[in-house]
Image: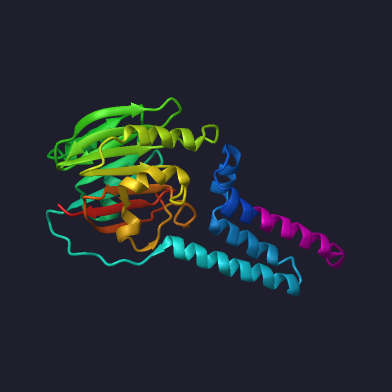
Amino acid sequence: MLKILRPIIHIINAIIVVGLIAIHFVIKESTYQTSLYYYTFPLPAIIIIVLVLSILLNKRFRKYNLVLAVVFLIIWLSRSFKITFTEDIKEQDLEIVFWNASNNQEFEDVFEETKRIPDVVVLAEYHSFDLKEARKKYSKYHFYENSIEEIGVFSKEQIEIKKVMPSKFGSAVINFETHGLNFYAVDVSGSIDVPRSWELEFVDNVIIKTKNTVVLGDFNVPYESKFLMQIKKKFNHAFNEKGNGFRETWFWGFPFLSLDHIWASKDLKILKTEKISTWKSDHAMLKTVIKN
């Protein structure tokens, strides 16, 4: 039966593979609908699909799938896998952490995962269940939470909230200052009903300061997205500059999509960036050190 169906399987395989190549390398984010396919089928997913399909093929056609999988793997590694050298870090340098807390995690979870208390922490999807206890326990430090926008901020120094900027469709940017730096905490809506183009345009419009500035958050688009072009022109990507390993932060420790990003203005020096995966959230934690 499989022998009879093989020609049909080969045709289906060719259609699927060509379609995936077109989505990822040609069509990309040209329309709202294709952008959803583009995010759904990043290179790791395409590699897995091509390998699974190869099981159903005969030896002659299987080798083409395997060659394609190797080519896709090389492209993915060249884009995503980083090897950099950490520069000397001093006590006064600033350790900054961003984490999508997935609704249930707290600042103390960050302290546990990083095994220290960073200088600045920003949490997205944060509901401040234990914030009162944290304020008591870490009374010499400073906390801010916005329950409407679900963003929390911790700092060892005073936090000055400059502006809270929600979009019409569930995204939010909070501009604050601490440790002598300007910050934009970003949480872009992940709703499939809201085009990312709208929300990233909103983010671009509200990020006014581009000096002495750190932009960090869940952007809900991968690094390759054309909607990050404006930020790329004005800021350096912390993981690209000083990270090691795979850049992807989602999901559950598997390097599927790089949705979370820390960006530093070009006048700031990034000394080290680390991705910390944990089962406490489907998003990995990002920690970067900025020279102070």
| Residue sitting nearer the eye, 114 or 47 | 47
Image position of 209 (left or right of 104): left
How are the residues colored?
A: rainbow
Please provide percent x and percent y for residue 43: 54, 58
Q: Residue 30's x, y, as percent?
A: 56, 42
- Name which residue lies at 19% across and 47% down: 119
Residue drawn at the location 22% of the way across and 30% of the way down: 161
Q: Which residues are magenta?
A: 1-19
Above or below for 10 versus 287: below
Q: Is residue 63 left or right of residue 36?
A: right
Question: Is residue 128 at all visible to an observer of this figure?
Answer: no
Left or right of residue 290: residue 233:
right
Would residue 26 be seen by someone viewing this image from the given angle?
A: yes
**Looking at the image, how many numbered discs can be counted on the residues?**
0
Would residue 77 be counted in the magenta stretch?
no
**x, y percent for residue 263:** 31, 48
- On whether residue 3 falls in the magenta region, the answer is yes
**Hey, which quadrant is residue 53 in on the image?**
bottom right
Taking the view exactly as shown, the residue that stands out farthest to the front is 233
Expressed as whole percent of the image width and height from the top left, the position of residue 184 reads: 29, 38
Vertical position of residue 176 compared to residue 212: above or below: above
The residue sitting at 27% across, 67% down in the picture is: 85
Chief SS of the magenta region: helix
Residue 65 in which image quadrant: bottom right
